[in-house]
Image: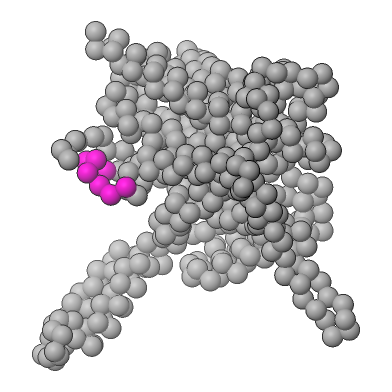
Amino acid sequence: MKLIPVYTWNRNYINFENRNKRFSKQPWAQGVILLACVVIAMLLANLPFTREFYKEFLETSLAIHVSTPDGGGFTFPADMTVEKFINDILMVVFFFTVGLEIKREIKFGELSTRQKAVMPIIAAFGGVVMPALIYALINHGTAASSGWGIPTATDIAFAVGILSILGDKVPVSLKVFLTALAIADDLIAILVVALFYGGNINFPLLGVALALILLIVLMNKVGEKRPWFYFIPAIAVWILFYYSGIHATMSGVVMAFLIPMTPRYSKGYYFRKRKQYRQLLNDYDSIHEEGGFPNGPQRHILRQLSKTSKDCMGLSYRLEHALSPWVNFLIMPVFALANAGVTIPSLEYFNVFHYAAGIGSVSMGVFLGLLVGKPLGITAASWIAVKTKVGAMPDKATWSMLLAVACLGGIGFTMSIFVDTLSFGDQEPALMTQLRDMGKVAVLMGSLCAGILGSVLINLAHKRQRK
């Protein structure tokens, strides 16, 4: 394969020099795997010989029953199933990594200064408000009205994957703009879930959780940087959130912002220790073993050097780097397998313009919100920011190209499906399931159409600029 130089992007998972790399290192790899899992989930949910097994497997209980000597006992968690395990436990890890990423970008990255942050944040806000308004106008006063948060999110994996395939047709400044926008969008989506899609609040348990969080903050302030001092409280915070009525995944975001970013050891300390270890390696060089270098003492020294090197990076960076592959290639595909499997009883599910009196049309609201609301909201908010001189247009970008890139913001998928699983809880079980399933189909259709529309418009804008 011919090596093709491409852009260098200041993202930890998009910083590459050529396309000749293994599949897992490609920026579009996660999107391809997610798409494959969506197809598999749809087949499992609709093929006659797998439909019942798929449904029963997701409803399998995972609760642990503990018996007491008097013949009683308790079950923990009482209503835990395979599906809830994925959505309430595995997704905590996803939200934890998202929180680590947002924290890093706020402190050192694309959201670290007013000049960098203001334009993407304003654009993200417009890209959340416009889809929500379109959905609310369509479904006001109907059973589907509470799903307004579904079309407000942007899936960074698919958007970045499409941008990487398009290569240099999009200015680097707009790629950075879309990435920063997606990060701000994630933060807004987290707030939407926390504020509007939780349950009834148990304030005593929430108070205990807040007290524990304050204790973790104090521990951070005094300089504690060992992982176990944060891992054990994180489990306690998750349990308290789970039973307090706030969605359990929010515990992941909260803990991410409490993980220290400063390293345990300083740069000077590392260089002093490295010098000592190098001298010790030379001192033990006289010990000859059959395997050659390194001998026994030298292996111990190298392990110590490795441990020192690791502790010269902040715990937040280490956790983000360690968890990202698991999130991208295990947790998110499993989430797609569990949540994208929608049973399609009729073609009505694909008719996004079907509207029923009293029920509304979750499909129309989600589809138009993603395909129309997202690009219009992002572009309109950006235009207002530029005209009022609050924000600045990205370098070498035109309005036609910005609109084209904004269409990729309509790829909702992960967060949109997640919000869909939390919506319509106030409806009858049968109607709730129907609304959620139709919402998921609309998310898939809207995201697909937004990706195609964005790619076509980017190619047209690029040709126009070349002429």
Of 446 and 50, nearer the camera is 50
* Relative vertical location of residue 253 with respect to residue 398 in this rendering, above or below: below
Of 318 and 42, nearer the camera is 42
Looking at the image, can residue 345 be seen? Answer: yes
Q: Main secondary structure of the magenta part?
A: loop
Spot the residue most to the front: 49
Looking at the image, can residue 207 be seen? Answer: no
Residue 67 screen position, x and y as percent:
80, 79
Residue 381 screen position, x and y as percent:
53, 19
The magenta stretch spans residue 235: no
Which residue corresponds to the image point at 30% horizontal and 77% vertical from the top-left?
Answer: 303
Please state if 1 lies on the left or on the right of 448 as rendered: left
Residue 325 screen position, x and y as percent:
42, 54
Residue 261 screen position, x and y as percent:
45, 57
Q: How is the image coloured?
A: one colour
Choose top left, top right, bottom left or bottom right for residue 398. Answer: top left
Please state if 2 lies on the left or on the right of 455 as rendered: left
* Relative vertical location of residue 234 with respect to residue 451 in this rendering, above or below: below
The N terminus is located in which quarter?
A: top left
Which residue corresponds to the image point at 25% horizontal and 77% vertical from the top-left?
Answer: 302
Which residue corresponds to the image point at 42% horizontal and 19% vertical from the top-left?
Answer: 404
The magenta stretch spans residue 19: yes
Choose top left, top right, bottom left or bottom right for residue 187. Answer: top right
* Relative vertical location of residue 332 with respect to residue 258 in this rendering, above or below: above
Which residue corresponds to the image point at 44% horizontal and 44% vertical from the top-left?
Answer: 33
Magenta span covers which residues?
16-23
The C terminus is located in which quarter?
A: top left
